């Protein structure tokens, strides 16, 4: 019964299984609703200017700009942090010492976060901590958090563990794409996403689930009445406003479009037959 329930969740909410073995968990603060008016600054907590930990934060800037957010560069950050003089981060005690030129930012306590927010004129900081794998070609571990500058509360958090053995590590490009996709899902309304050993479960808040079901039932009513264009419009609304990967809506759009093509073809054939019959009568 549990397996059937999981399968139903995957089918209805449109989450596809991931390919390689790795663990990804994304959780949104239940009291937060995001808007594209949010101004953010991407702040690496550790970075190598020429390596993975330097590339991923820059790629995140591109992605947030593409989603319509205002993103502030970190060029002013060094001065702000040096003035704050907080203690150094030490969250990798179990890891081997990071080789140069890997650097760590000072720890960002509540006062420092607020000061950075005021100085940069942003609403939130996207904090990234990226550890490369042994080959230095992909990510081994990562922590990404969006933090409100006024309250220092975490708006969403991502934890990533890429493979348990060297043979299982996921390449950088699909891995980064997964991070971007699930950030988009969280910003569009998902409350939690978990990917483990190739199985993916996405969870929407009850309000969004009810709205999708309501729209789905309305679209099916139109479909059963033969009003395919009206049904397609509603299924597209589900994809645009709630879940761009909602497979049932995608499938029914394709089905409805095929029905419309057949209907148009049938009408055209009948029209042609009528014209031929009319010409025969005249002769």
Image (spheres, rainbow, N blue to C red):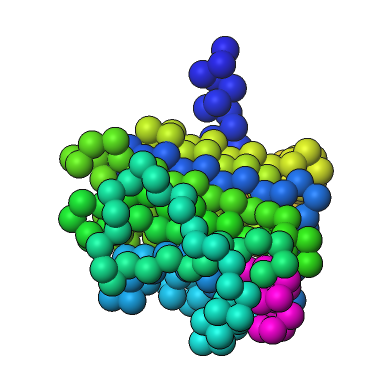
- Closer to the camera in the image, 253 or 46: 46
- Closer to the camera in the image, 120 or 93: 93
Magenta region includes residue 123: yes
Would residue 64 be visible to someone looking at this image?
A: no
Q: Is residue 43 left or right of residue 103?
A: right
Residue at 67% of width from left, 69% of height from top? 112
- Closer to the camera in the image, 266 or 80: 80
Magenta region, residue range: 113-125
- The picture places residue 99, in percent across and down from the top left corner, at 25, 62
Magenta region includes residue 18: no
Q: Is residue 96 left or right of residue 120?
A: left
- The picture places residue 16, in percent across and down from the top left corner, at 46, 42
Residue at 32% of width from left, 67% of height from top? 102
Would residue 166 be visible to someone looking at this image?
A: yes
Residue at 71% of width from left, 76% of height from top? 115
- The picture places residue 141, in percent across and down from the top left corner, at 38, 49
Residue at 52% of width from left, 67% of height from top? 106
- The picture places residue 241, in percent across and down from the top left corner, at 70, 59
Q: Is residue 234 left or right of residue 8?
A: right
Q: Is residue 260 left or right of residue 92?
A: right
Q: Quadrant of residue 68?
A: bottom right
46 shown above or below 255: below
- Closer to the camera in the image, 219 or 86: 86
Prevailing secondary structure class for the magenta stretch in the rendered image:
helix
Q: Count the marks: how many?
A: 0
Q: Quadrant of residue 213?
A: top right
Quadrant for the N terminus, please: top right
């Amino acid at each position: 019964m549990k397996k059937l329930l999981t399968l139903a969740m995957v089918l209805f909410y449109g989450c596809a299984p991931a390919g390689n073995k790795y663990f990804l968990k994304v959780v949104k603060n239940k009291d937060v609703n995001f808007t594209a008016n949010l101004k953010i600054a991407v702040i690496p907590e550790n970075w190598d200017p020429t390596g993975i930990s330097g590339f991923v934060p820059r790629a995140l800037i591109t992605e947030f700009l593409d989603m319509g957010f205002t993103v502030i560069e970190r060029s002013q950050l060094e001065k702000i942090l040096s003035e704050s003089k907080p203690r150094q981060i030490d969250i990798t005690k179990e890891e081997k010492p990071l080789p140069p030129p890997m650097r760590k930012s000072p720890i960002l306590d509540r006062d420092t976060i607020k000061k950075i927010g005021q100085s940069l004129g942003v609403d939130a900081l996207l904090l990234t901590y990226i550890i490369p794998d042994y080959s230095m070609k992909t990510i081994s571990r990562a922590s990404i958090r969006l933090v409100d500058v006024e309250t220092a509360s975490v708006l969403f958090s991502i934890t990533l563990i890429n493979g348990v053995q060297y043979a299982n590590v996921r390449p950088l490009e699909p891995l980064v794409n997964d991070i971007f996709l699930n950030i988009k899902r969280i910003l569009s309304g998902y409350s939690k996403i978990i990917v483990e050993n190739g199985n993916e479960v996405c969870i929407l808040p009850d309000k969004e689930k009810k709205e999708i079901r309501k729209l789905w039932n309305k679209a099916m009513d139109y479909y059963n009445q033969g009003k395919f264009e009206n049904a397609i419009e509603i299924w597209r609304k589900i994809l645009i406003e709630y879940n761009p990967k909602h497979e049932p809506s995608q499938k029914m759009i394709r089905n409805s479009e095929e029905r419309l093509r057949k209907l148009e073809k049938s009408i055209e054939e009948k029209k042609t037959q009528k014209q031929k019959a009319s010409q025969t009568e005249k002769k």
